[in-house]
Image (cartoon, helix red, strand yellow):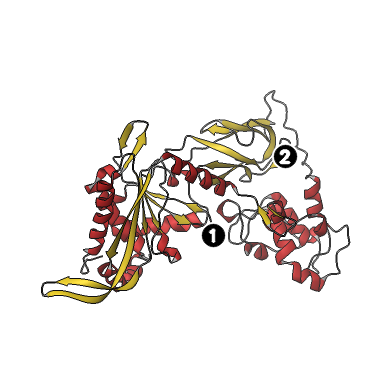
Amino acid sequence: MAEIELIMPKMGESVAEATITKWLKSEGDQVEAEEAVIEIATDKVDSEIPSPEDGVIKKLLFNEEDVVQVGQAIAIIEVEGASSNGQPSVQVEETKPEKEEVAAVESKPTSNGAASADSQDVSKSTPSGKFLSPLVRNIAKSEGISMQEIDKIQGSGLNERVTKDDLINYIQNDRQTSVIQSTPAPSTSSPKEASAPVAQDKVHLMDNGDEIIQMDRMRKMISEHMTMSKSTSAHVTSFVEADVTNMVFWRNKIKDEFLKREGEKITFTPLIIEAVAKAIREMPMINVSVDGDKIIKKKNINMGMATALPSGNLIVPVIKNADEKNLIGLSKSVNDLANRARGNKLSPDEIQGGTFTVTNVGTFGNVMGTPIINQPQVAILAVGAIRKKPAVIEGPLGDTIGIRHMMFLSLSYDHRVVDGSLGGSFVQRVANILENFDINREI
């Protein structure tokens, strides 16, 4: 046997280390090429590191929760090939699954009356290209689950990979009705009864019926980050109401043409980010961070855009050098980052380096909010829902009342370095840019 090192990969220019959150393999386990060996985390992004070759895990070099530098070896894998002493390589004996995994994959009649494991052949990936680990394939084979059926399961792994827990949860819950209809009730020793649903590891009932739900890793990190921000920065929030009628009319006028020409939908988010970037160029002291008693004035304008995830958690992908992009570029960046954020497909570098953040509380129907600053930034802008309201319209012949599209902007800023003059002037400047939107603007 030859030995190779599994290396902590480079995950972006600004990412120098990662935390090991979970070993998916133990010493002595067999692993296939491209099969996930370890889960890692940097800030809010989870990633998996696959094995580069078929082999056996000989040694794990770090423990869970250890922080590892990029480029360090994290495990030793024995692979087939000539050994160091020139002797022929020895065939690796397949490692037996753990007891609970054995119970989960025992051969038994399937829910649709199909043949058991021996008559099924499960490939390494589904028709849509989802990679399947050996254990998942073994369970699917034993249960008579087809590749097409697995393709319909929403995977929780990297790139929507279907994990063992996903498949067992599907078998125990989503397939339960068909199991009852097509097979006798399981005996008390049935593997289905022997293994508890995955969710029960995280949800517990109290005597009075209240539920205790364990925070997931991302929720813990959000909790810590937000609490740290409130204790670090002296938060102040200023509000402005903006008449964005011209912007709304312009978007409604060009959105179909934009979609047809660019293949992208245009939302209000890139229009707002464009206005914020312009205001930051005019007032660069809002684009700073604090280091002790020093103020670091940022050269680049890297715009964070808070994005809600299907899980209910929040992540902030970053548009680098947002002021250098035109509206088409901003629209594509916004759509791409938002879609990949919801699919857990962001790289660690894509949530790093933000200098200012925009959050759209209007997505949830809220008219305004008081957002918490995303450290180490010193300001965050919340935009509320756009609503039709009667408003005074100033004209050369006097004032009139009309129905206008109005939106609240709220800027939370760090009063240690941003005074009310700058904070209030900045949010007003963003409102002015939006109010003076050119309704005849070309795409």
Mark 2, secondary structure of its residue: loop
Q: What residue type is labelled 2?
A: Asp
Q: Is residue 328 visible?
A: no
Task: Give the residue drawn at x 44%, y 46%.
Answer: 351
Is residue 9 found left or right of 442 in the rendered image? right
Secondary structure category for the residue under label 1: loop
Q: In this view, does 232 lie above or below 216?
A: above
The quarter of the image holding the N terminus is top right
The x and y percentages for residue 413 are 35, 47
Q: Earlier in the sequence, mark 2 or mark 1?
A: 2
Q: Residues within 10 Å of mark 2 (few under 14, many from 20)?
A: some
Does residue 4 appear to the left or right of 114 in the view shown? left
Give the labeled residue for mark 1: 310
**Nearer to the camera, 272 or 435:** 435
Percent x, y of residue 58? 70, 32
For mark 1, does the 10 Å Cα neighbourhood hold few (<14), some (14 to 19), or many (20 or more) residues? Answer: few
Residue 220 drawn at (x, y percent): 56, 46
Q: Tell me the quadrant of the picture where the C terminus can be found.
A: bottom left
Q: Residue at x 25, y 44 (%)?
A: 284
The residue mark sitting in front, 2 or 1, is 1
Give the label on residue 29, or none.
2
Report whether residue 366 is seen: yes
Amino acid type at circle 1 is Pro
- In the picture, the disc for residue 433 is none
Q: Position of residue 412 (x, y in %)?
A: 36, 50
Left or right: residue 55 versus residue 284 is right
Query: How far apart are the two marked residues, 2 and 1, measured between alpha carbons?
Result: 33 Å
Kindly indicate the quadrant of the structure image that contains residue 36.
Answer: top right
Residue at the far left in the pictured view: 397
* CB within 8 Å, label 2 to label 1: no
